[in-house]
Amino acid sequence: MKSKLIFIYNANSGKLNEYLDIAHKIISPKTYQCHLCDITHGTFKVRPAWKKFREETDIAMEFLHIDEYESKYKSKFQHAFTYPIILIQEDSDLQVFMSTEEINKLETVEELMGVIEVRAEEINIS
């Protein structure tokens, strides 16, 4: 099975949650809880550089909100993760590709893309 990166945003899915997130970004951006959302999305849409990266990369990626991830992957035997996080799936095994702490230190989407490219090359995923 081909390796896949699973991006898990620190947010729940659904239109109501999306509207609440937009309002939070506008009213109190410094307290917004999903730094991965913050650097990959503007207030209303995906950042163009991130959209282009996703379209052009050979790396398999899946993007989930917490509730979607827990419904699809989480089991009682699995480690409890903090969010946002990027996991790598190889066969049925999930490992941390980039931790919450690492994501929270990033300042731009370009930094995120650079780290993904370097780490993907180091472990030979594409």
Image (cartoon, rainbow, N blue to C red):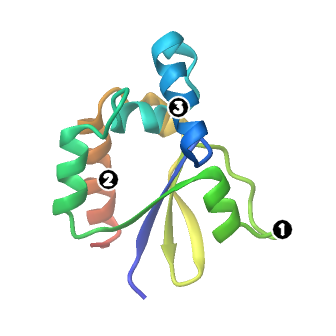
* Quarter residue 54 falls in: bottom left
Residue furthest bottom in the image:
1
Write down the quadrant of residue 120 in the picture: bottom left
Which SS class for mark 1?
loop
Residue 3 seen anywhere in this rendered image of the structure: yes
Amino acid at pointer 1: Lys
Between residue 105 and residue 9, name the one nearer to us: 9
Residue 93 at x, y = what percent? Answer: 59, 77
The residue tagged 2 is: 116
The circle drawn on residue 19 is 3
Disc nearest the viewer among 2 and 3: 3
Distance, label 2 to label 3, CA atoms, is 29 Å
Left or right, residue 27 beside residue 50: right
Q: Quadrant of the C terminus?
A: bottom left
* Neighbour tally class for label 2: few under 14, some 14-19, many 20 plus, Cα within 10 Å: some
31 shown above or below 10? above
Mark 2 element type: helix
- The relative height of residue 38 versus residue 76 in the rendered view (above or below) is above
Determine the CA span between mark 3 and mark 1: 31 Å
Distance from disc 2 to disc 1, alpha carbons, whole Å, reads 29 Å
Please identify the residue farthest to the front as the structure is shown: 15
State whether residue 62 is above or below residue 39: below
Residue farthest to the right?
76
What is the x, y in percent for residue 27?
Answer: 51, 11
Q: Quadrant of the N terminus?
A: bottom left
Residue type at numbered disc 2: Ile
Of the numbered discs 2 and 3, the one sitting upstream in the chain is 3
**Mark on residue 35?**
none
* Left or right for 53, reference 2: left
In the drawing, what numbered circle is on residue 76? 1
